Amino acid sequence: MRLWPRRRIYVDDLPKTHDLRFATLFILIFGLVLGSLYAVGHVLVGDRLPADTTVAGVDIGGMTSGEARTVLQSELVPRIEKPVKATVAGRSFVLDPQESGLTLDIEATVDEALAGGSWDPRHMLNVVSGGGDVSPVIVVNADEMRAALRVIDTSVKRRPTDATVSFGGGQPQVSLAVQGRRLNSTRAAEKLRGALLSRRSSVSLPLAAVEPDVTSSEATRFVSGVADSALSAPIRLRVTDQVVRLLPRVFGPALRAKAVDGGLRLDVDAAALGARSRGVIDSLPNQPVDARILFEGDRTVIRPSQAGVEFSKAQWATAVLKAVTRNAEKRNAAVRTSPSRPGFTTQQARMLAITTPVVSRVVRYEEETPGDGTVAARQLHRLLLPPGETVSLRDRVSVRRHLRTSTLSASAIYEAAFRAGLTVVERTPSPVYVSSSTPGLDATLSVPGSDLVIRNDTPYGVLVRANAAPLGGGIGELHVELWSSPYLNVTVASSQRYDVVEPAVIELEGPECTPKPGAAGFQIDVSRTLSRGDGPGRVETTHTRYQSQPAVRCR
């Protein structure tokens, strides 16, 4: 059986009788010849690089891929791994390519030189016709590159400075913006890679400008628009039914230009505004008034308290900001207020029951400077000690400024408090006895160190009344009274002086010698008995030791 029918062949007309089998046979023979030639070409040049092939100046022409890898490893890699000097913004940095994430991929470079692989006809054609210069394949590790460039960027970057507007002196002043800079990391990485490819040992890295959020032109527009309008005229503020007028010279220096979303917004420094407008605020009649206990002759009177309204510095500043941002016809705003009770009410003053002088003492003093007695009286007068509260005399008097008078004040108030039955929390006696005070009932102050702390454990308030009476010749008397309501019966008794130490005598010569009488040292115990009603009461004893002070005689 035949696969196709027999056909006749006519010798005198071959084109008409060309058999399909002949064409098929021809194609098979042609393909076999071409494949044989291709196989022979692969055997001869398949793994060999074209002649005259170079990689960054390293000749690898005619070598096998293995030989080329060895040559590139020994000659090109050491050269590519050499440090590169990078210059940016006038500063120089030395970068290790490998530590910066740049490495030579030898396999990829050789594959590139093979031009498609050993079976690729283009490669065989290149082997015959000759090769050329092949760029080395540089692999970039993005993380390592970013880390290396971050070090440079940290050194050369400069933050931009926003334009600002200040209101010193009440007039807006513009401080111009300053452009910042940073390393252009993307282009810097490309430049470093290019330096390796071109075998350069140094490279200049580019910078990128960083614009400020607030530009100079924005600040200028803010001044010519918002700021000038805010300072154009006085404003009026309403506090309940009172209206006060503020001039630009008062509120102007408290204005601020606040940077918000790339622009400037007018703001007010509440603390600065409060300080500058304190006189206006204090003149408002709506503020709460504390009750006061006053002395009138031989009695006390209470000046009643008054309720009022209050507002914070922030509420005052909010009203000012509203007013200054309105046009000339409507430059006014209301201050939000809330009811305010006085800190010390009439009822609280009455509950203290301060009606009677319970203790009265007189301390004679000798002035070192005129007015010592007046200073001491002023430090003590109207000192109020509510029930259960404690007072530190060192916190009330100016010890550093008036050391002598503060000790005089401490001695006077201590003896009065001791005799009134108040609790003495802390007391330090004078190291040397001074004849103007009662033995064992004196006190001294110093900073840091000695203090006089007294607590009122009675159910009534205690108010100090003090005044100085000059007697002439630098001598005066300090009168101290403690006003309250009778609560305790206090009896004071004192021991005799004991362990007396007579003062030593020092004799000096010369015109600068000043005689001093000296003072004896001794110990003394002062006790007080505190009682209520007919009970035996409680006895408290205070022990005091005084040092002797040498006397000075002049020859």
Image (tube, grey):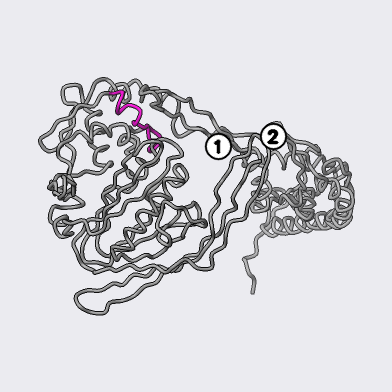
- Secondary structure of residue under mark 1: loop
Q: Which residue is mark 1?
A: 159
**From the viewer's perspective, is 141 left or right of 368?**
right
Considering the image in quadrants, where does the C terminus appear?
top right
Whether residue 120 is visible to the viewer of this picture, yes or no, is: no
Residue 6 screen position, x and y as percent: 65, 64
> In the displayed structure, does residue 468 sit left or right of residue 526?
left
Q: Nearer the viewer, residue 216 or 207?
A: 216
Task: Measuring from the top left, give residue 20's x and y in whole percent.
Answer: 66, 57
Which amino acid, mark 2? Val
Residue interval drawn in magenta: 248-264
Q: Is residue 401 above or below residue 525?
A: above
- Looking at the picture, does residue 377 appear above or below residue 244? below
Badge 2 density bin: few <14, some 14–19, many ≥20, Cα 10 Å:
some
Query: Quick check: 254 above or below 287?
Result: above
Q: Quadrant of the N terminus?
A: bottom right
Give the distance between the C-alpha atoms of the residues marked 2 and 1, in whole angstroms. Answer: 16 Å
Q: Which residue: 59% across, 40% down?
A: 514
Whether residue 336 is in magenta: the answer is no
Residue to which mark 2 is pinned = 88
Residue ID at (32%, 58%): 416
